Amino acid sequence: MPIRLFIDGAAGTTGLEIRERLQGRDEFELLVLDDAQRKDEAARRDALHAADIAILCLPDDAAKDAVKLAEGSGTRIIDASSAHRVADGWTYGFPELIGQDKIANAQFVSNPGCYPTGFLALVAPLVRAGLLPADWPCTVNAVSGYSGGGNALIDRFERDTDIAFRAYGLRMGHKHLAEMQVYAGLAYPPVFSPAVVPAFRGMIVDVPLPLAAANGAMITFANGGFDEELLRKDAAIEDTMALYCYANADNTQVRLIAHLDNLGKGASGAAIQNLNIMCGLPETTGLRL
């Protein structure tokens, strides 16, 4: 019997891509609401209760409302919003960091943010190993394709083709900071400088680090081997993430860099990966590797 799956918010950027990726996969039976039902609370409640698994591709407040609508159903939930990433009772859906078993056995899984995915892949293992002090004041410079901002930002960039670079989060309160701090094991949130460029998808997360911050064992960093890191305007869907370390000539400074697709490993690809794990399927089924 196929697994009944409901995507709440299937008309958004992440939801649309998840739905497209699941086409032709007979392991799942998609429960679909028509345009008139998508914002009807009763119809959504019925779908959430009828599903074995629901994926929430909604703004934070709407995701919280959806969880309330699903109460009493036993439906397992993957939340792609930032509403529950550090909430009690939720498992953080980063299997390479948290472990597959925790996700496989969870009822509530919160998809990581795209920027935190890159940051945590670079920093969390160093803190865990005692190579980077938990109280080190980390900084993060990151740039993303404009699809990460949802339909409103997509419309803005495609309407105003004169935008070359958009720095934001200037008031230092980005919603991704909490998960960055918690899952990296840091005493303080990092200083985060995100930006958007006129490429549809793709992301580079850059963590500069003076080696005086670290134990001597970190001096073994090797160069990534490239002269530059690029985002392509026409980049294809990709669910892998590449990690690089660039060191200066005397090994006193490094730049830790993660290169990923903000809509792939940073969003819809991660949701599919978690869905596979929760359903006992091969982890990479349907992923673009």
Image (tube, rainbow, N blue to C red):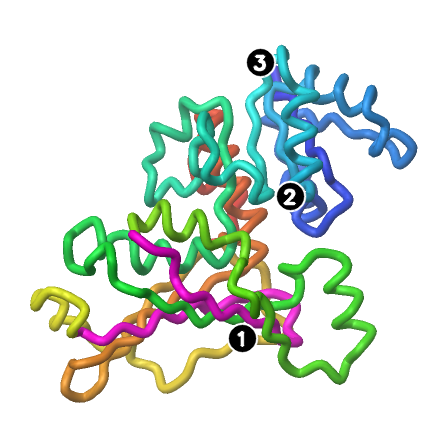
The residue drawn where x is 73% and y is 39% is: 9
Q: Which image quadrant is residue 91 in? A: top left
Amino acid tagged 1: Leu
The residue drawn where x is 74% and y is 72% is: 157
Q: Position of residue 127 (x, y in %)?
A: 22, 54
Task: Give the side of residue 58 with respect to residue 241, left or right.
Answer: right
Q: Is label 3 or label 1 in front?
A: 3
**Which residues, given as a range, are shown in magenta?**
187-211
Task: Give the side of residue 206 with respect to residue 49, left or right.
Answer: left
- Disc 2 crowd, CA 10 A, few/some/many (<14, 14-19, 20+): many
Asked whether 143 or 104 is in front, the reply is 143
Q: Is residue 275 above or below residue 133?
A: above
Real-space Cα separation, disc 3 to disc 1, in angstroms: 42 Å
Q: Does the magenta run of residues contain 216?
A: no
SS assignment at label 3? loop
- Which of the two labelled residues, at mark 1 and mark 2, occupies the earlier sequence position? 2
> What residue is shown with label 3?
74
Of all residues shown, which one is farthest toward the right?
36
How many marks can you see?
3
Amino acid tagged 3: Gly
SS assignment at label 2? helix
Real-space Cα separation, disc 3 to disc 2, in angstroms: 22 Å
- Which of the two labelled residues, at mark 3 and mark 2, occupies the earlier sequence position? 2
> What residue is shown with label 1?
231
Residue 18 is labelled as 2
Q: Position of residue 60 (x, y in %)?
A: 64, 41
- Disc 3 crowd, CA 10 A, few/some/many (<14, 14-19, 20+): some
Of all residues shown, which one is farthest toward the left?
216
Q: Is label 3 or label 2 in front?
A: 3
Q: Tell me, yes or no, if residue 145 can be seen here.
A: yes
- Disc 1 crowd, CA 10 A, few/some/many (<14, 14-19, 20+): many
